Image (tube, rainbow, N blue to C red):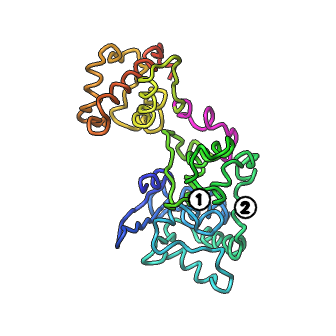
Amino acid sequence: MLNAISTKFSSLCNVGTTGIGKTATLTCLLLTGAAGAAGPGPSAVDGRSVYRFYCYQCHGYAGNAKTLSSTYLNPKPRDFTAESLDSLPIDRMLDAVRNGRPGTAMMSFDSVLVEKQIEAVVWYIRDQLLENPGAGEKYHSPENGWQNFERYGAAFPFITGELSLDIPQDELEATQRAGRTLYVSACVSCHDQPNTGSGSAIWETRAVSFPRRHYSHRAPPLDVVSGASPYARHDVAVVPENMTEQQSRGMQLYQANCAFCHAPDGTGRNWIGSFLQPKPRDFTAANFLLHDAPDTFREIVRSGIPNSSMPAWQHVLTDDEIDATVSYINIAFRNRAKTSEGDK
């Protein structure tokens, strides 16, 4: 889960464990440039933009600190909605942003933000978040990219706790089942406080590649399949017709284990694949000959390839699962060979 947090935030995170129960302490720095320079976030001095670029991961958009990262932090991030102008003096807030708070995950932003940004974000918190438990309602708005937000309504009961994830699927109505699926596959990445007996949810994950600089849900087009990033079209899984039971199982195994590097469409041209060296194998390439050598192909999957990012899967997948995965790759990608470089 800690790895999921690091990936999800696209942050540079220092993660440590201390004490009984291995309480995790995260210090996340959203920087892509060198320390000492103003961060790559908002170009204008806008307190809300600064807050939503640097602060929301721990304090939440609403300022109530009900975030995924807060569940791993000790002490917890400050809940601004529970504070008042008197209980949190402005000088104290400015000092906290500039110098951080030793013994907590609150880092110093003195080398990250210029003084005007520090002042702007403090005034935003004081004006919009302090003593304002309803601040989060402003986030899911058309202005923030959430067009027709009510269309996600089926998932709301699982976010608010009205419905528990512990309810058996066959006891849910069709709309509730769809809402549950939406929650565990999407909403859970931010609203990871489900109403369950264990207090946690099992995420339903899939391989996607939406790097920060190419995708924003705030800017049109909002079609995350065809318009999210240059890599988005490679994140569409290939579903062949008339698959056998073995091939259908292989598709599930491929998408769960192999697509992260080789891409759901088998090209290896998703975001992860774009910076691995050597490049992941393109199963659709005309020069990929292992479709006709299944025994060799299976052995490569079992044993991996030295000096590459291709690991050995023999201790992760059974022989039957490897056979199913290879069978799916052969039926899904062998007839999709590229005929020219322009079809990338």
Looking at the rendered structure, the secondary structure element under dot 2 is: helix
Residue under label 1: 53
Q: Residue 247 occupies which quadrant of the picture?
A: top left
Q: Position of residue 169 (x, y in %)?
A: 58, 45
Name the dominant secondary structure of the magenta segment: loop
Q: Up-down: is 300 above or below 55? A: above
Q: Up-down: is 5 above or below 135? A: above
Decide which of 79, 27 is in the foreground and name it. 79
Q: CA distance from mark 1 to mark 2?
A: 18 Å
Decide which of 116, 343 is in the foreground and name it. 343
Looking at the rendered structure, the secondary structure element under dot 1 is: helix
At 30% from the left edge and 18% from the top edge, which residue is drawn? 294
Q: Give me the disc on residue 71.
A: none
Q: Residue furthest bottom?
A: 86
At 45% from the left edge and 33% from the top edge, which residue is drawn? 255
User: Cβ–Cβ below 8 Å for labels 1 and 2?
Assistant: no
Give the amino acid at mark 1: Phe
Q: Up-down: is 327 above or below 274? A: above
Q: Which residues are magenta?
A: 217-234
Q: Position of residue 145 (x, y in %)?
A: 70, 48
Q: Position of residue 250 (x, y in %)?
A: 41, 27
Q: Up-down: is 36 above or below 276? A: below
**Circle 1 or circle 2, nearest the eye:** 2
Q: Earlier in the sequence, mark 1 or mark 2?
A: 1
Residue under label 2: 137
Give the amino acid at mark 2: Glu
Which quadrant of the rendered structure holds the N terminus?
bottom left
At 69% from the left edge and 63% from the top edge, which residue is drawn? 136
Q: How many other residues sit within 10 Å of disc 1, few (<14), some (14-19) or many (≥20)?
A: some
Residue 308 visible in the shown view: no
Q: How many other residues sit within 10 Å of disc 2, few (<14), some (14-19) or many (≥20)?
A: few
Q: Residue furthest front?
A: 171
